[in-house]
Image: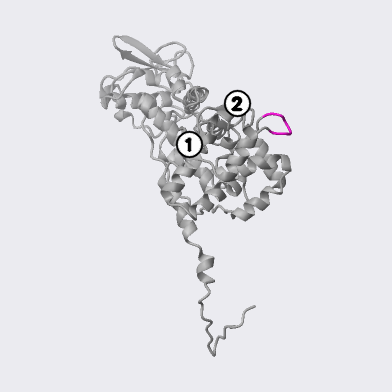
Amino acid sequence: MKFHTTNDIPPLNHKGGELSGLDLTELIMWGSILCQRCGRTRRERVCPHCGYDACLIRLPVQGKYKRIYHDKNGAAFSFSTAFQSLSAINQERKDRKFKIENWLQPSIQQQKFQNKYKTWINQKRIEAEKERFSYETLKLYQSYYKNHYGSLYDMDVRDIRHGDLQLLMNGFASRSEKYNKNLMDCLKTFFKWLNRWEGVPIPIFPEVEITTGETSRALTYEEQMETILRFPEQHRDILYFWRETGLRVSEVCAVQIRDLDLPNARILVQRTYSGYRLVERTKGKNRKWIPLSKTAMEIASVHSANRFGVDFLFINASTGRGYKPSYLRGLWATHGIKGISLYEAMRHSTISDWAKHATAFQVKDLARHSDIRTSNRYVHNAMTDLRRVVNRDNVIPLQSDSNPIRQNRP
């Protein structure tokens, strides 16, 4: 059935009521709806010639006819869905946005979220193999797709809007605010890639506010030393060295003999572990020298004696190989302080200790922070010792008749 003039608009009294609610007068007269079985023009829900119900759309494109058999969800056209799609096609044509490939099934399948996301993950895997991307982050992105993005799988990435993302986020109500933010940030990164490579518009994302900040606890130097004594003696040296350098757990395990410059009392931080993979880069993707304290120098000198090159500085006495981050985390679970993470007990506590005696810029260099604002928070916290303020020695005890305050405190 071709629509060329307003006189060709089909009647509204089709049996079955399938066209109820459709405004046929809005259709721009371009294209035909045919029966999928006999190929004759259709204006009824069921073909009067062969009794078949499925339809197709035929369009003249560049001197040839193109046939569309399915809607964008992959379902065969009924007359009403074919009519709706033909209306949308004509609107795109009117707006000069029509592209036939966007209506053909292979292209539609390629544009589905699940296929585009897999293409993106494959790209990230290539980057990880070339050590330009973290394998651990890759695992997170894969986990997010598998466990949380199911409602987007069959959607065309070009059709995903703010409302779709808001509904997705509403399903995360039981998750922490930080985890929800990570899920949305992953999708933002994905859409930025789509926009850069294919020009797909980036949808407006729901705002994710973190209203419950996570407070990290820092141990004092004395508490750190006492905690390390909880561990078996053969594992203490790497912990003492770690405490002195403030490295990340994945970095302290990756230190090799060649990274040491003992005459100048310094170490080059240039590699890390990403999961179980050793990669020649750090979190900040840079190489940087940091000074070694006297204690760190003594430990490094003992463990590097008569050893060279790519040998790991610290060898796990239990395995005969270098330490892995997962092994140290396991030790902490057994011998550490309950309620305090390994990160808090080591790197965070060491940086907090430095901040008591250093400027934010010095802390930034020692901790290798990428942003001075991160370092400044450590210095600010170190300078604000509220307990010392309220317990100062010159406080004068007060007393009133209505509310006496004890003057003689034990």
Residue 321 image offset from top left, x and y in percent: 68, 29
Which residue corresponds to the image point at 49% horizontal and 57% vertical from the top-left? 382
Q: In the picture, which quadrant includes the C terminus?
A: bottom right
Q: Which residue is mark 1?
A: 289
* Residue 19 visible (yes or no): no
Q: Which residues are magenta?
A: 316-321
Figure quadrant of the N terminus: top left
Residue 184 place in picture, x, y as percent: 47, 40
Farthest residue, direction bottom: 401
Determine whether the residue tagged by mark 1 lies in a helix, strand or loop: strand
Q: Nearer the viewer, residue 304 or 33?
A: 304
Near mark 2 (Cα within 10 A), the count class, few <14, some 14-19 or many ≥20, is few
Residue at the far top in the pictured view: 64
262 w.r.t. 403: above or below:
above
The residue at 72%/34% (across/down) is: 317
User: Percent x, y for residue 10?
Assistant: 34, 24
Q: Position of residue 319 (x, y in %)?
A: 72, 30
CA distance separating discs 2 and 1: 19 Å
Q: Is residue 246 left or right of residue 193?
A: right
Magenta span dominant secondary structure: loop
- Which residue position holds label 2? 308
Image quadrant in which you'd find residue 62: top left
Amino acid type, residue under disc 1 in the picture: Trp
Residue occupying image coordinates x 49% and y 55%: 356
Color theme of the render: one colour
- What's the amino acid at mark 2? Phe
**Mark 1 Cα within 10 Å, few/some/many (few <14, many 20+)?**
some
Disc 2, SS: loop
Return the residue nearer the eye: 142 or 363. Answer: 363
Q: How many marks?
A: 2
